[in-house]
Image: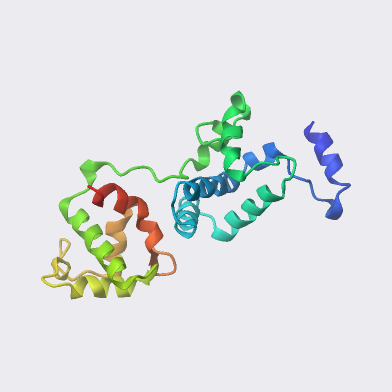
Amino acid sequence: MAQKRRKLGKNNQGGRHTPTAQDLLNRPAFMGALEVEKRVSAGESYYEAREEIAQNLKISTRTLERNKLAGQAFSAMGQPMASWQTIAHALPGETNPLWHSQAYGKTSAIAPRPVSPSTVTGTDIQLLKHLKEIFDETGALKMPSADLVAALLAKANSPWNTCGKSSKPMTGKLLANKLTKFRIRPRYSSYCRAHFHAAFNRHLSQ
């Protein structure tokens, strides 16, 4: 069957293989695009969902967009992309490409694994709280690491002027080290608010 699909694909424009539903469902990036659709339908911001999922899958947001368009262009399905999640769950045995199967096992981090509460200290929670305050006060969706550090140090009675074992002021490197506990990493020396979404919800919503 696969050989037949490849042979038919050669007759298409450009000689490229036309993807089947199974082909798309076996793409981690396409499953990521489905997850974006699912989160948006649940009320989450499209851009925040796209940024977080792209970061967790270690792919670009452009790759997610391409896979979203691929799904929308696959007219044989005739259904909204959000319904593909259910279709994938219905696939039997080894043909099921979702993250609980071997086919999807290498990229099972569409949603970040929760951080163990035992590894999170009061200081970690305070850092998250202060970072959320900074994003809320500025209204920024993205901030350079240097600006975040400066805002932390500028807080009244800031505990970040003497932190770490060396009791030195917070630095960009120290901030990055502390945030790895929440699986948050800078991109091009900047942080997107969307990257903090899961940590804020988990640790500051109580």
- Left or right of 172 in this view: 165: left
- Left or right of 89 in this view: 136: left
- Left or right of 7 in this view: 44: left
**Residue 163 position (above or below residue 7):** below
Residue 111, percent across and down? 43, 45
Residue 22, percent across and down? 68, 36
Q: Nearer the viewer, residue 102 or 110?
A: 110
Question: Residue 61's image quarter?
Answer: bottom right
Judging from the image, the colouring scheme is: rainbow
**Residue at image x 58%, y 48%?**
29
- Left or right of 139 in this view: 1: right
**Residue 148 position (above or below residue 69):** below
**Residue at image x 30%, y 44%?**
115
Q: Which of 181 and 196 is in front in this view?
A: 196
**Residue 68 position (above or below residue 23):** below
Q: Nearer the viewer, residue 143 or 35?
A: 35
Q: Nearer the viewer, residue 108 or 34?
A: 34
Residue at the farthest top position: 93
The quarter in which the N terminus is drawn is: top right
Question: Residue 26's image quarter?
Answer: top right
Residue 112, percent across and down? 40, 46
